[in-house]
């Protein structure tokens, strides 16, 4: 499949539907494959004395607001999928009603069979986040899904720190996960959006062969809101998607069946051929000293086929710098 680009809104909407629409617009205009919403019911997700409870209260959107955003996405960007990152069963029920395209299980719930199996029962695709999780936890979570339904599973890998230091990314381990579990692998990038690494590390991941890129998007990073550190502005996200698509084209195919027209022209121009080092009379038994290896106006015998000429006798006079072909010798 083509590299799937997921625009992760997270909490960048700051609890404001109008800001959420700006982010959706950014993802849609950039032609992201999907927009990802974090949908939760706070009383069912976090205990009241949790240090982030008051902040989450300000960020939480009502189900009616999420319904409005789903409808907005469907009407304005009908080809862009909606992925719901859910944390409890109440939100899963809501997402079934509004018909999202796929679900994300946060790595915090990788050891939560109750939520994982509940989501799997929808039979929708599950993007399974694996950050800060053991191989055994990942394996078990996949088994719970398979025991419940035929839901497609995408493994999502990302270092859970904002912003992520390059030394903590470990792209090679991500590819180990792909090989071990035989599932599509996605890279969740949390690099500092102010740095070039916000582009170069995802680019490296695509070059290594990831199937999915998840990248945070916001409405305006200068405002320093929640989930803004690793998030690109809409104009940056357009460039980001363009970069991924360009790399995707450059990756090309693993096998080549024939040369392109440009390559054939290059071979004719640049490849070296066997030519006469000096004027060679007819009837000369050729030696290494009679041959040169040079670029010519057209392709002749390549240098590694000199053995087809050495020791043979010329059947015609050959001028200096002329191609020597197999038909020129006896």
Image (cartoon, rainbow, N blue to C red):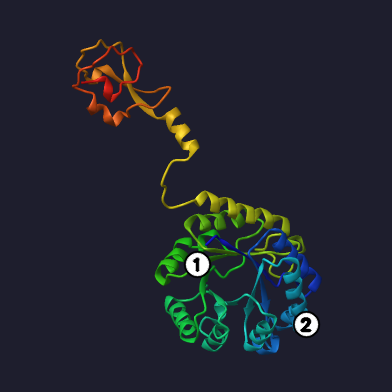
User: Which quadrant does the C terminus fall into?
Assistant: top left
User: 212 or 281, which is in the foreground?
Assistant: 281
Quarter occupied by residue 59: bottom right
Q: Position of residue 241 (x, y in %)?
A: 63, 56
Residue 55 badge: none
**Residue 220 sits above or below residue 54 on the image:** above
**Residue 133 sits above or below residue 219 on the image:** below
Quarter occupied by residue 71: bottom right
Q: Position of residue 47 (x, y in %)?
A: 66, 89
Q: Secondary structure at mark 2?
A: helix
Query: Residue at 51% across / 60% down in the picture?
Result: 167
Residue hosting label 1: 185
Drawn side of residue 264 relative to residue 96, left or right: left
Residue hosting label 2: 64
Whichever of labels 1 and 2 marks the residue nearer the N terminus, that label is: 2
Quarter occupied by residue 68: bottom right
Q: Residues within 10 Å of mark 1 (few under 14, many from 20)?
A: many
Report the number of discs: 2
User: 77 or 186, which is in the foreground?
Assistant: 77
Q: Position of residue 234 (x, y in %)?
A: 72, 59
Residue most extreme to the right: 18
The answer to whether residue 46 shows anywhere in this view is no
Query: Residue at 81% across / 70% down in the picture?
Result: 18
Query: Residue at 49% across / 80% down in the picture?
Result: 150
Q: Secondary structure at mark 1?
A: strand
User: 252 or 110, which is in the foreground?
Assistant: 252
CA–CA distance in space, label 1 to label 2: 33 Å
Query: Residue at 27% across / 20% down in the picture?
Result: 328
Q: Residues within 10 Å of mark 2 (few under 14, many from 20)?
A: few
Drawn side of residue 302 relative to residue 210, left or right: left
The answer to whether residue 17 shows anywhere in this view is yes
């Amino acid at each position: 499949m083509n590299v799937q680009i997921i625009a992760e809104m997270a909490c960048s909407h700051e609890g404001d539907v109008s800001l959420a629409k700006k982010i959706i617009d950014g993802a849609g205009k950039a032609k992201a494959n999907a927009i990802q919403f974090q949908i939760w019911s706070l009383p069912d997700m976090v205990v009241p004395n949790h240090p982030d409870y008051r902040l989450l209260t300000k960020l939480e959107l009502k189900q009616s607001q999420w319904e409005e955003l789903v409808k907005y996405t469907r009407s304005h960007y009908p080809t862009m999928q909606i992925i719901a990152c859910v944390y409890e069963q109440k939100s899963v029920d809501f997402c079934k009603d509004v018909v999202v395209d796929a679900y994300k299980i946060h790595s915090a719930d990788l050891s939560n069979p109750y939520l994982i199996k509940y989501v799997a029962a929808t039979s929708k695709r599950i993007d399974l986040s694996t950050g800060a999780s053991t191989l055994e936890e990942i394996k078990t979570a996949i088994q719970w899904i398979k025991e419940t339904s035929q839901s497609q599973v995408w493994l999502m890998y990302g270092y859970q720190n904002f912003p992520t230091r390059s030394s903590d990314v470990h792209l090679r381990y991500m590819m180990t996960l792909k090989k071990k579990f035989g599932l599509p692998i996605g890279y969740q990038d949390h690099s500092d959006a102010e740095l070039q690494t916000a582009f170069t590390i995802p680019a490296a991941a695509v070059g290594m062969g990831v199937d999915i890129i998840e990248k945070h998007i916001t409405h305006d990073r200068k405002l320093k809101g929640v989930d803004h550190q690793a998030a690109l502005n809409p104009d940056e996200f357009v460039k980001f998607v363009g970069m991924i698509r360009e790399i995707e084209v450059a990756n090309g195919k693993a096998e080549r069946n024939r040369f392109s027209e440009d390559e054939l022209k290059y071979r004719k121009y640049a490849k070296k051929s066997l030519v006469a080092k000096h004027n060679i009379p007819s009837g000369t038994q050729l030696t290494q000293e009679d041959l040169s290896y040079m670029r010519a106006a057209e392709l002749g015998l390549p240098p590694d086929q000199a053995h087809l000429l050495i020791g043979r006798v010329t059947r015609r006079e050959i001028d200096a710098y002329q191609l020597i072909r197999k038909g020129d010798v006896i």
